Amino acid sequence: MTPEPGAPASTTERVARILMAFGRAGQPLGVSEVARACDLSKAVVHRILQTLVREGLLRADAGSRKYALGPAALALGQEAARGDALRSAAMPVISHLAEVTGETTTVTERVGHGRHYVGQIESFRPIRITIRIGDQVPLWSGASGLSILAFMDDDDVDYVLGGELTAFTEATVTDPIEIRERLTAIRERGWAKTAGERVPFSSSIAAPIFDVDGTPAGSLSIAILADRADGHAEQELSRLVVTSAADASTRLQRIRRGVESPRRR
């Protein structure tokens, strides 16, 4: 619901305004400065600033009586930059992969013990698979998630498989023992494949994208209709996906080391 013109700002909007003010300023700000910048009363600003300090989003300097972005805000910024680096590294790669295969290609970012889609190039075919950017998906389901999970530490795998595993379709594998067997096979061959486990009639092949420390930062995949994924196609597509993932890994690591600059897309 859109607020009426002239209506008082909600608490959420006020908090957002204040945080954005610090982002624009690039320097510590006092209560009066924030109040002027956000068109809010000093009493409201002071109350919100105290809450943000308690949550670590801001820090207070007792000497100057000013505030600056805190460790939690910096962590959010670093996480955003991390995801931007992955997308920057992988988008040119999946663009080429989509052009070569004519199928939909995606980039998935690992976030803790989950993942979400950060990039997609849709197939030019009339009937095609498509995903929604930003969708949150568990690591234990789908080729993209499994290709990440297979290369994570045993403790992480135990944590992921120790949670609730709810089926998306009748084909979804939810047995932890069977999933562990799949992870072993994925580690041996370097790629994962699923068919109809998250989306009916959809088949996906994915491979991990590795960060500078050797951990999976995410994965890239190709998504096709199940009836277009015969044995010969699977062999060729898996080769292309693994090669593309290796290329994206190299690009990501170069960005992390400052050898290559990320491109805004």
Image: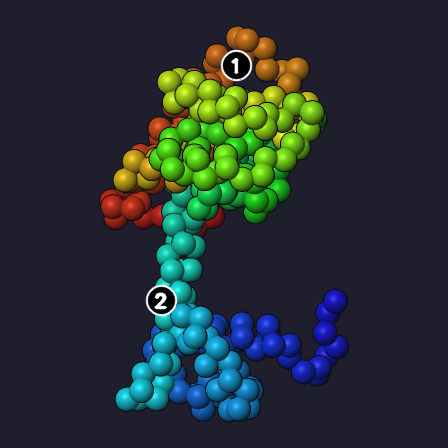
- Does 93 sit above or below residue 1? above
**Helix or strand or loop: what does disc 2 sit on?**
helix
Residue under the point 39% across and 17% down: 189
Q: Nearer the viewer, residue 195 or 20?
A: 195
Say which amino acid is labelled 2.
Answer: Pro
Q: Nearer the viewer, mark 2 or mark 1?
A: 2
- Which class describes the residues within 10 Å of circle 2: few (<14), some (14-19), or many (20+)? some
Q: Position of residue 65 (x, y in %)?
A: 34, 89
Q: x, y percentage for residue 147?
A: 45, 29
- Residue located at (53% from left, 43% from top): 116
Rendered residue at 29%/36% (across/down) = 214
Q: Which mark is residue 234?
A: 1
Q: Residue 187: name its quadrant.
A: top left
In the figure, 154 relative to 230: above or below? below
Q: Which mark is residue 142?
A: none
Tally of numbered discs: 2
Residue 40 appears in the rendering: yes
**Residue at mark 2:** 71
Q: What element does badge 1 sit on?
A: helix
> What is the three-letter code of the residue carrying label 1?
Glu
Q: Earlier in the sequence, mark 2 or mark 1?
A: 2
Position of residue 194 in the picture relative to residue 89 (left or right): right
Crowding at dot 1, Cα within 10 Å, few <14 / some 14-19 / many 20+, comes out as some
Q: Picture coordinates of residue 228 (x, y %)?
A: 63, 15
- Name above or below for residue 120 compared with residue 243: below
Q: Residue at 74% x, 67% y: name it.
A: 1
Residue 216 seen from this side: no
Tell me whether circle 2 and circle 1 mark residues in contact (CB < 8 Å). no
The location of residue 259, given as percent across then percent down, is: 24, 44
Instruction: Measure the C-alpha gap from mark 2 to mark 1.
Output: 46 Å
